[in-house]
Image (cartoon, rainbow, N blue to C red):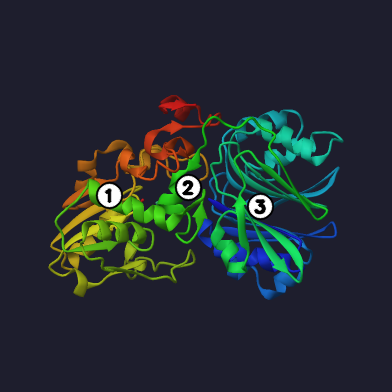
Amino acid sequence: MCGIVGIYNHAEASNLAYLCLYAMQHRGQESGGIVTSEDGTFHQYREMGLINDIFTRDVLTKLPGNIAIGHVRYSTSGDSSLKNAYPFVIKYAHGWLAVAHNGNLTNYKKLRSELEKEGSIFQATVDSEVVMHLLAKGGAAPLEERLIKALQRIKGSYSFVFLYEDGLIAARDPKGFRPLVIGELQHNGQKTHVVVSETCALDLIGAKLVREIEPGEIVILEKGTVRNIKPFTPAKKRAQCIFEYIYFARPDSNVFGRDVYVMRTGFGRALAREHPVKADIVVPVPDSGVPAAIGYSEESGIPFQMGLIRNHYVGRTFIEPKKEIRHFGVKIKLNPVRGVLEGKRVVCVDDSIVRGTTSQKIVKMLKDSGAKEVHMRISAPPTVWPCFYGIDTPTREELIASSKSVEEIREFIGADSLAYLSQESLYWFEKTSPREWFCDACFTGDYPEELDDMPEIEKMAKKTS
Ligand code: AMP
């Protein structure tokens, strides 16, 4: 998964991009990068690791210019290496061009092999490289025209920001899988435009949210003006990712026009109505399960307690000692509070079960700390199908719910009871945002966009529309 940013018209564009990426670090922790344009001259820096480690003061001073784009990456297409870090930059007949991409193109392999047959040479294994090749192919036509043609050929999910010598372009796929918003910042009497994946990044730099970039919309920021075009016939159905609400986005963000926190507490409330249980305390799996557990507690009247505490300093850099000591597993991240748990019947709330190994360890941890009963409640339906639109999920075989029933999963994780939110209750908010606006393929197998690169899944999936 990834987070993207574009800053237009600010003397400290790279600093603002850095801050926005910092706020969106949860969207990707593998690599980060910023590219700036200083009157048409590009400056770039990309590195593996976390934003705060990559962008030192020294690095940022080497990124002058008043337009910038940036990216945080967690790979869903292409391996995790510096050559695949974004933004992706090329120099071609029309000058310099860079792109940052959130999403996943589902006909990348097919397009790449077609382009290679025609003589294109690829440097990396990231899907958006095909977009750069398609953009390079449109002859002398203006960028806008070449972009429309390129976007017509790609399938899958994309929220893009492009940086070119004169400006910045933001584009969102016609089904609107991934979020993208535009905001404004007033600075020394000048207006700066900011494009970001999540509104929490606007909050950090003091920018005001203007609106969502609509599915299928292209916004062009050039020569001090903002223009938008909608060159595609609007898709009959949107396919906004429901998992952004369940797990992925920050709870303090507004995504697809709704507050993520409100959505999550709503899932928790619906879960309590659908799957009540007699218990003494509601305990979240922090951080992802906290808002849903608050909702469950409010609805059920069972007191909320932090029976598990998370170590917030665990990064990807933690090196686990080998056999000399022991295997730490989930204990590196979470520690139980015995005083809270001892002798209690616990409702433990988490957002999802993927492979099932985390829940298994958590149930054991709660019981080892004296919990009398552990009732696991999941604020989403079972994750049965992999995502091909930008969320990092394992293969179908590795998803525990694809081969085991709820009762078998309960037995595997060792809980006294286990219940998931139903597909019906998931859409508690349906009156104001119809369920047809969402992609929930991870629960249903209804993939809303063709999977040209995955013919086996395409055959197995329930349908595509
Ligand atoms: P597992 O042990 O594989 O069942 O992992 C379950 C945990 O992973 C839950 O606590 C979720 O919050 C978390 N989770 C769910 N989806 C993802 C994802 N795409 N990437 C990382 N963690 C996830």
In the image, residue 223 above or below residue 305: above
Q: Amino acid at mark 3?
A: Lys
Q: Amino acid at mark 1?
A: Leu
Residue holding disc 1 = 271
| Mark 1: secondary structure | helix
Measuring from the top left, give residue 233's x and y in whole percent: 64, 30
Q: Is residue 257 left or right of residue 286?
A: right
Q: Nearer the viewer, residue 248 or 457?
A: 248
Q: Are marks 3 and 1 in contact (CB under 8 Å)?
A: no
Q: Amino acid at mark 2?
A: Asp
Q: CA distance from mark 3 to mark 2?
A: 19 Å
Residue 375 visible, this angle: yes
| Nearer mark to the viewer, of 3 and 1 | 1
Q: Is residue 274 left or right of residue 57?
A: left
Measuring from the top left, give residue 171's x and y in whole percent: 66, 44
Q: CA distance from mark 1 to mark 2?
A: 25 Å
Label 2 within 8 A of ligand 1 by Cβ: yes
Earlier along the polypeptide chain: callout 3 or callout 2?
A: 3
Residue holding disc 2 = 392
Q: Are marks 1 and 2 in contact (CB under 8 Å)?
A: no
| Mark 2: secondary structure | loop
Earlier along the polypeptide chain: callout 3 or callout 1?
A: 3
In the image, residue 29 above or below residue 121: below
Label 1 within 8 A of ligand 1 by Cβ: no
Crowd tier of the residue under label 2, counting other residues whose Cα lies within 10 Å: few below 14, some 14–19, many 20 or above: some
Crowd tier of the residue under label 1, counting other residues whose Cα lies within 10 Å: few below 14, some 14–19, many 20 or above: many
The residue that appears at 50% across and 42% down in the rendered structure is: 240
Residue holding disc 3 = 83
Q: CA distance from mark 3 to mark 1?
A: 44 Å
The residue that appears at 56% across and 58% down in the rendered structure is: 199
Q: Nearer the viewer, residue 258 or 240?
A: 258
